[in-house]
Amino acid sequence: MKKFIFVFTVLLAFTAIYSQDDLKQRSMMKKTIFYVTSDGKTASADYWQLSLGNFDVRVQRKYPGEGMVSIDGSVNAALMSGGYIEGNGFGDRGKLMAMADFAVKRDGKYEIVRADSIDFIFYGGTKAKLKDSDQIEDLFVHIEDPYNTYQPKKFILGIYSGNKNTGELTFMRDVSPLIGISFTTEGAQKAYKAALAE
């Protein structure tokens, strides 16, 4: 019986390790982003994460025998090159992973917007122009509930390089100060012009 428990524990550990590696690879899928530095130069990165800041949250989680429970904690939010915002941190019951989205405020309500619907982001990550709008709008990070909605506190682009043979990703550098980002070169140039106009 002890041998069975040992083997089961080892298998569980390997499963957890491989799951984390798989999650990292999914969050770091290749998607080119164009960014503008303070000198007005545009560059690009294929593997990256955009740090948005650490936020206090209250989220609902289901626990066996307890039903839905309110969890208080804090998470670091980052837009990953996989195309979604990842929120990892700790709550009053241990590790906490939260889902997050970008949002804009219209008619007094937060409206979720997909990252690929944004033309460009600038002004410390707090302002954006959507592709279907001519207006510059305030940008927010919406973490599962309108109660957990904040403007970005950070705007730092972490750049990674991918090994073609092994598929491993290696952190290269942070880009800061960062003027603006976009998924197109034209959008990045517009972000720079918008930043100069602010």
Image (cartoon, rainbow, N blue to C red):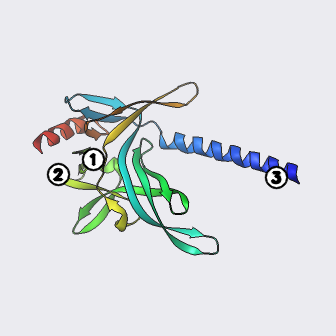
Whether tag 1 and tag 2 are in contact, CB under 8 A, the answer is no
Mark in the foreground, 3 or 1: 3
Judged from the image, the secondary structure of the residue bearing numbered disc 1 is loop
Identified at 81% across, 47% down, the residue is 7
Return the residue at label 2: 134
Judged from the image, the secondary structure of the residue bearing numbered disc 2 is loop
Mark in the foreground, 2 or 3: 3
Mark number displayed over residue 125: 1
Residue 98 visible to the viewer: yes
Identified at 25% across, 33% down, the residue is 36
Amino acid type of the residue tagged 2 in the rendering: Asp
Q: Quadrant of residue 67?
A: bottom right
Query: Between disc 2 and disc 3, whose residue precedes?
Result: 3
Q: CA distance from mark 2 to mark 3?
A: 61 Å
Viewer-side residue, 50 vs 2 = 2
Return the residue at label 3: 5
Residue 168 lies left or right of residue 76; in this view the side is right
Viewer-side residue, 109 vs 90 = 90
Determine the residue located farthest toward the top in the rendered image. 165
Determine the residue located farthest toward the front in the rendered image. 92
Amino acid type of the residue tagged 1 in the rendering: Gly
Judged from the image, the secondary structure of the residue bearing numbered disc 3 is helix
Mark in the foreground, 1 or 2: 1
Image location (x, y in percent) of residue 38: 21, 32
Crowd rating for badge 1 (residues with CA inside 10 Å; few <14, some 14–19, many 20+): many
Image location (x, y in percent) of residue 108: 23, 69
Q: Quadrant of residue 23?
A: top right
Amino acid type of the residue tagged 3 in the rendering: Ile
